[in-house]
Image: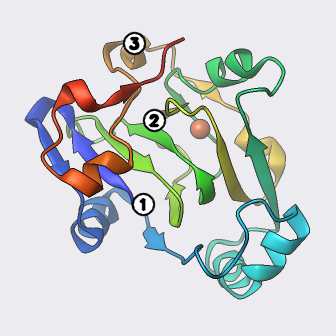
Amino acid sequence: MALLRIPSEDRVIDDVDAIRSFLLPHGIHYDRWAVAGRIDRDASQEEILAAYEPEVTALKERGGYITADVVNVTPDVPNLQEMLDKFNQEHRHAEDEVRFIVKGSGIFYINPENGDPVYSIEVQEGDLINVPAGTKHWFDLCADRSIRAIRLFKEKAGWTPLYTGDGIASSYQPLCFGPNYLAGKGIHIEQAVTLTA
Ligand SMILES: [Fe+2]
């Protein structure tokens, strides 16, 4: 389940409905689709897309997306850091960034246009999220440096990062709390895991 953090307010939101309500005014739709018992996390791309066909089709109709694929990032992907460096600086996209996490985890930081404080959304297995076109954001993997996700596109070129040139991302650690948070609640910062470059 996702975790939403507002670092400047030292605030964490871990309730599905509360996360949904927080994100909605920002144009971000958050949802949960079951993974356990439904699909093998290591199934083929085709099997994963087939398993979630009803949800993916509904999303395509709602958001005007044309294609879907499955991205699979693991620590042994060649040039992984180079790839991550493309997205861990503040950027926008010409189209929505839509992800459903099948396995692994990652963290989106959102810098709202309306001056609201920067917040992060840590996404894990079963989380569906969209970052609307034009939203200032950046992304990093968590310490396990792996993620498997369904992506939806109108056109893949729309996912090219358009950098804002603002170095704001360097002020925020790519800090993921991980499943420990949910197991233990009230986790201390020392227990959190950090992605080291
Ligand atoms: Fe992005």
Mark with earlier residue (1, 3)? 1
Q: Tell me: 7 left or right of 101.
A: left
Question: Is residue 156 visible from the viewing direction of this image?
Answer: yes
The amino acid type, in three-letter code, at marker 3 is Ser
Q: Which residue is mark 2?
A: 136
From what the image shows, is residue 117 above or below residue 48?
Answer: above
Element under label 1? loop
Judging from the image, the colouring scheme is rainbow
Circle on res. 28: 1
Crowd rating for badge 1 (residues with CA inside 10 Å; few <14, some 14–19, many 20+): some
Three-letter code for the amino acid on which mark 2 is drawn: Lys
**Which residue type carries mark 1?**
Ile
Crowd band around label 3 with a 10 angstrom C-alpha radius: few (<14), some (14–19), many (20+): few
Q: Earlier in the sequence, mark 3 or mark 2?
A: 2
Mark on residue 8? none
Residue at the location (18% across, 47% down)? Answer: 12
Residue 105 drawn at (x, y percent):
53, 46
Mark 3, mark 2: which one is toward the viewer?
3
Which secondary structure, mark 3?
helix
Q: Which mark is residue 170?
A: 3
